[in-house]
């Protein structure tokens, strides 16, 4: 089965060094032979559904035919300085595999927009009843638009990334969410050096890229703090003299992010593997997330699995892990499957959606023609950064 095969591959590298934000996504993104039954057609095919009678300033609205068939792309932090990231050191291969550069991201987003995708929130797909039941609700989009969820994983500026050409953190300056970034000369810069501020700028110029104010979902762990602030008591109690102030500062940034239309998801506290972890381990980890991360970014009903490692195969959720996570308020669950443009599942008590990794690995598959998935969203040949080496990714040279 696809999901177990994928996690088996991933688990080989699990926590091989602290650095492994990396394998948020699947390493194994070739098309699976045993593709999920509902995933045979691309998302664009399912738009032809029922036209509704309503209208908007942009013209007539059309109800999206199937809320379980919504595409979802995800990214890690962007490489701001390819020279320092792709410098051949221990981490360089991981950056090549799991990240794209600022240059690549800007081209990708432009093309996704040009192909008539529109950003939606998972919360525009369902409502939750008082008994925990999930009901899909009509998604009405301007005619010709295709819904897209976008998510950013591990927006933590992890310790291991220090000095490798990534920003230090997010801050709010003059009412705008921007990065603090030290350039190669060590000079502090303030500006759009990662996806979130870049998206903010893009949406200023292209407000119709957002459906009813939806932007994206940010998947947050806790062990290195959040948003570049070392806010974890468990990890930094004796090390970070500014712990309390950092928590306050991080909360201000998180509030500004949410006020601008972004949403947060749990990505577990310790970037754990939900497939392999027994339910007791999942519980202990979630308690840390609720204690250290939720007070800063807020409660959430969205769970984005690290490594894409789901709690079950493609059959309906019903196991003990699901019962626990549901009891903790999680309603929507996100694994990884880059073999099809969209995959989803609506159970009576949850919505599940597959995400597509956009990174060096998937770009390499797209360029070499071993996967067509990214071609649905952009032309992989035209987005590639000339500073990326010929190998494109770091693993399959
Ligand atoms: Zn991750």
Image (spheres, rainbow, N blue to C red):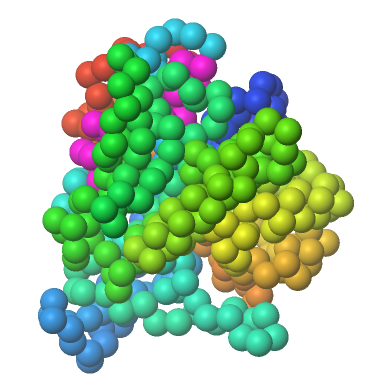
361 in relation to 325, above or below: above
Residue visible at 50% across and 39% down in the picture = 228
Where's residue 312, x and y in %?
Answer: 71, 54
Identified at 22% across, 90% down, the residue is: 54
| Residue 83, quarter of picture | top left
Lateral position of residue 25 relative to residue 184, left or right = right
Magenta stretch mostly in which secondary structure? helix
- Rendering coords of residue 1 (x, y %): 66, 44
Q: Residue at x 30, y 14 (%)?
A: 185
Q: Is residue 190 left or right of residue 114?
A: right
Q: Is residue 120 visible?
A: no
Foreground: 70 or 40? 70
Q: Nearer the viewer, residue 196 or 357?
A: 196
Q: Which span of residues is magenta-colored?
A: 91-109
x then y, percent, for residue 125 = 45, 73
Q: In the image, what residue occupies the spot 67% across and 21% down?
A: 17
């Amino acid at each position: 089965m696809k999901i177990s095969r994928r996690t088996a591959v991933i688990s080989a590298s699990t926590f091989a060094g602290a650095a492994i934000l990396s394998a948020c996504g699947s390493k194994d993104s070739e098309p699976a032979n045993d593709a999920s039954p509902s995933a045979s057609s691309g998302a664009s095919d399912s738009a032809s559904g029922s036209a509704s009678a309503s209208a908007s300033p942009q013209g007539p609205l059309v109800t999206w035919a199937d809320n379980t068939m919504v595409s979802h792309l995800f990214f890690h932090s962007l490489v701001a300085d390819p020279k320092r990231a792709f410098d051949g050191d221990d981490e360089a291969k991981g950056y090549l595999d799991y990240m794209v550069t600022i240059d690549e991201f800007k081209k990708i987003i432009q093309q996704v927009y040009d192909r008539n995708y529109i950003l939606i929130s998972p919360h525009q797909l369902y409502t939750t009843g008082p008994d925990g039941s999930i009901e899909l609700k009509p998604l009405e989009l301007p005619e010709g638009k295709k819904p897209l969820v976008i998510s950013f994983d591990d927006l933590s500026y992890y310790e291991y990334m220090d000095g490798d050409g990534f920003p230090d953190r997010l801050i709010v300056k003059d009412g705008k969410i921007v990065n603090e970034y030290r350039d190669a000369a060590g000079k502090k810069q303030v500006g759009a050096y990662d996806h979130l501020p870049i998206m903010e700028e893009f949406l200023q110029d292209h407000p119709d890229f957002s459906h009813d104010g939806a932007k994206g979902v940010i998947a947050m762990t806790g062990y290195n703090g959040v948003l570049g602030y070392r806010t974890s008591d468990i990890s930094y109690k004796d090390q970070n003299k500014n712990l309390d102030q950092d928590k306050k500062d991080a909360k201000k940034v998180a509030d500004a992010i949410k006020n601008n239309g972004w949403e947060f998801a749990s990505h577990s506290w310790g970037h754990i593997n939900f497939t392999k972890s027994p339910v007791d381990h999942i519980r202990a980890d979630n308690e840390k997330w609720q204690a250290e991360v939720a007070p800063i970014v807020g409660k959430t009903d969205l769970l984005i699995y690290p490594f894409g490692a789901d709690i079950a195969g493609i059959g309906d959720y019903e196991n003990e892990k699901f019962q626990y996570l549901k009891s903790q308020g999680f309603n929507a669950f996100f694994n990884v499957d880059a073999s099809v443009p969209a995959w989803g599942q609506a159970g009576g008590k949850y919505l599940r959606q597959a995400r597509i990794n956009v990174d060096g690995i998937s770009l390499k598959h797209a360029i070499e023609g071993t996967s067509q998935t990214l071609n649905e969203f952009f032309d992989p040949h035209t987005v590639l950064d000339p500073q990326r080496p010929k190998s494109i990714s770091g693993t399959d040279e």
